[in-house]
Image: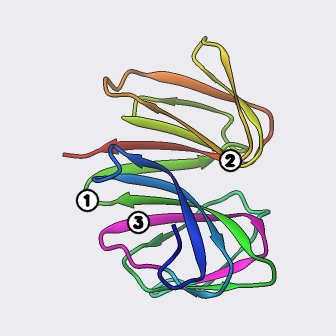
Amino acid sequence: MPWKNGGGTTRELLAWPTPADWIVRVSVADISASGPFSMFEGVDRWFAVLNGGDVALSTQGLAPRRLAASLDELHAFPGDAPTQCEAFGAATQDFNIMLRRARGTLRQSPLRQRPSLESSHGLVAVFAASPVTVRVGDGPACELGAMSLAWWRNAGRAPLRWRAHGAVRGWWLEASATG
């Protein structure tokens, strides 16, 4: 989907629980020019540069932050605060998570810092920026290619175990609906 400001495009990977009424939205975006981010009322956002040039995000009420593809931590900011993106050099490809804060909770962590995960959240996902092997419990291994998102709906909220094999760049996501 092209952006309204003409500065990039977005590919939605997941809208949970449904595309029309999402609590969590995960996407990959291509930024080709500096400009403002779209505002999303009541939404918290997380952002990382996957590849390409650095960007600086300036969000009202927060210190400006320069982001590069070498960083594993996701940058968190409120989606309902004006945010300006300054692109340095080459176009970038970026990872984005959005959460409707009144309707759910989200935890995220880098794969390199946490190769295994035990969770009973309603949704568990893994995004791999580079190829990774994931195993759920004692089940068979699943190979994920670069720029892949795999997710599990856990309606019964059963305790589940996941393990990522290989020191790769990516993130675990755990989300639950509230109320």
Mark 1 residue type: Ala
Q: Quadrant of residue 31?
A: bottom right
Mark 1 → mark 3, Cα distance in angstroms: 10 Å
Q: Which residue is mark 3?
A: 44
Q: Is residue 129 left or right of residue 150?
A: right
Query: Of label 1 and label 3, which has the lower sequence position?
Result: 3
Give the dominant element type of the magenta stretch: helix, strand or loop: strand
x, y (%) of residue 34?
64, 87
Q: Which mark is residue 102?
A: 1
Q: Which mark is residue 170?
A: 2
Q: Which mark is residue 116?
A: none
Residue 155 colored magenta?
no
Specify start and end residues of the magenta stretch as a single range. Answer: 38-57
Mark 2 → mark 3, Cα distance in angstroms: 20 Å
x, y (%) of residue 33?
66, 85
Q: Nearer the viewer, residue 118 or 87?
A: 87
Does residue 5 lie above or below 159 as drawn?
below
Taking the view exactly as shown, the residue that stands out farthest to the front is 1
Mark 2 residue type: Gly
